Image (cartoon, grey):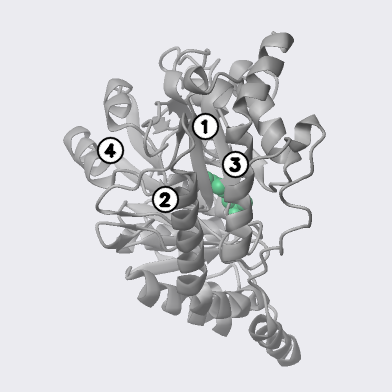
Amino acid sequence: MSGQLALLGGSKTIDGPFKPYQPIGKEEADAARRVIESGVLSKFIGAWHEDFFGGPKVREFERQCEQYFDVKHAITVNSWTSGLIAAVGAIGIEPGDEVIVPPWTMCASATAILHWNAIPVFADIDPTTFCLDPRSVEANISPYTKAIMAVDIFGHPADMDALMDIARRHGLKVISDSAQAPGARYKGKYAGTLADVGGISLNYHKHIHTGEGGVLFTNDDRIADRLRLIRNHAEAVVGDMGVDDLTNMIGYNFRLGEIECAIGIEQLKKLPTLIGSRQRAALRLSEGLAGCEGLQLPLVTQGYEHAFYVYPMLLNTDTIGVQRELLVKALAAEGIPGLSNRYQNVHLLPIFQRKIAFGKKGFPWQSEICKREVSYRKGICPVAEDFNDRRYLGFSMCSHVLEDNEIEKVVAAFQKVWSGLHELRELNNEQR
Ligand SMILES: Cc1ncc(COP(=O)(O)O)c(C=O)c1O
């Protein structure tokens, strides 16, 4: 594909909008209506009572998730942020404990740790998977480390064998933040089910959703009990339930409603098809973009099954000879929707840079519970920082349907920009 680049006045490769991704259909509408007609929109009671476990749709959805994801306990929550907070509390994290987390994630992975007055410690990411690099995890372990938060970012599972091995050797717990990876697999097992506790997000921009929501997974009965308590006013329940260990038994209302769970039941049925269509689109992108020199495409090695929430690429700007920002402008001008040239370096957010979280005096860092100075300065995670500053280019896979003809257009737009690189290089040099 050649022709004048749209950025330089030529016509766009993609002239119309792509079909928006819409996994919610008639099945979900009917299911929601049936719940409304039943009049039971929630049945949770924050007391030791049969309804402590929620209403019929909550229980049905949870049992179906257990079957689907092949896990002993599935526990619904009203967001995955709530799920992460419950997970950190349930594994018994104490104030001042350190939890290792990647910076290349959504901020809730780290703030859930902070929420229990524990200290997030950022370890760098692996340059191929974008997930926690086990070597960096090992290098960041201190006498105060109590857990690892593995994030299956963009739908690619983290290297769970390596992380679980580190955890075993150092006596740590592992949480798997698989928000973006519902249905992804690691060595045949579903993402989120390989750690002490894990789970997925059901917010509206994920593969399947209930508007807002999340599902926790664990194979540990004790952790499951504690998750259910934190979800539903633990402090009011533990006495009657005869719970002795009150560690983190401060409860919340993290309960998901009956309508959402009825929708979730329908969404779960669609998950294999929706994941399959993301994987197919990713494969076609990889085939089509293979000839773009200096563009590194996602590599999925044996044992991993990627859910492709995002199709992540890396730019070798030295080979390409054009700065990322200009290249992205040229690609966007061709009409490609859903491109982004940044993700997250959570350690560089103001909350960590200024170490101001609870109140204004720097708690928990400036307090006796924080046992050592933990650094969040730029430079501690060189791979994640370099990707964000210069090299990363992401294509959102859950914003549009991405039918074959749409993927062909995306490929054509990339190829057109790549064949016009000489013009962009001139522009790039002028702008320097
Ligand atoms: C990696 C990751 N962790 C946590 C969350 C928080 O999930 P939720 O929006 O359901 O609270 C998200 C949401 O996008 C996420 O991508």
Q: For the residue marked with disc 1, what is the amino acid?
A: Asn
Q: Which residue is rendered at x = 41% and y = 17% of the image?
A: 371
Residues at circles 4 and 3 in contact by the CB criterion of under 8 Å: no
Q: Which mark is residue 117?
A: 1
| Horizontal side, residue 143 vs residue 310: left or right | left
Residues at circles 2 and 3 in contact by the CB criterion of under 8 Å: no
Residues at circles 3 and 1 in contact by the CB criterion of under 8 Å: no
Circle 4 packing at 10 Å, graded few (<14), some (14-19), many (20+), is some
Please report whichever mark, 4 or 3, sits nearer to the chain's N-terminal start: 4
- Element carrying mark 2: helix
Q: Is mark 1 within 8 Å of ligand 1?
A: no
Viewer-nearest of labels 1 and 4? 4
Please report whichever mark, 2 or 4, sits nearer to the chain's N-terminal start: 2
Confirm whether residue 238 shows in the render: no
Query: Is 38 placed above or below 374 here?
Result: below
- Residue 213: x and y, percent? 60, 62
Q: For the residue marked with disc 4, what is the amino acid?
A: Leu
Viewer-nearest of labels 2 and 4? 4
- Residue 224: x and y, percent? 38, 62
Q: Quadrant of residue 204?
A: bottom right
- Element carrying mark 3: helix
Q: Nearer the viewer, residue 208 or 128?
A: 128
Q: Nearer the viewer, residue 124 or 273?
A: 273
Please report whichever mark, 2 or 3, sits nearer to the chain's N-terminal start: 2
Query: Is 128 placed above or below 409 here?
Result: above
Residue highlighted by disc 4: 172
Q: For the residue marked with disc 2, what is the amino acid?
A: Ala
Of the 4 image quadrants, the one containing the C terminus is: top right
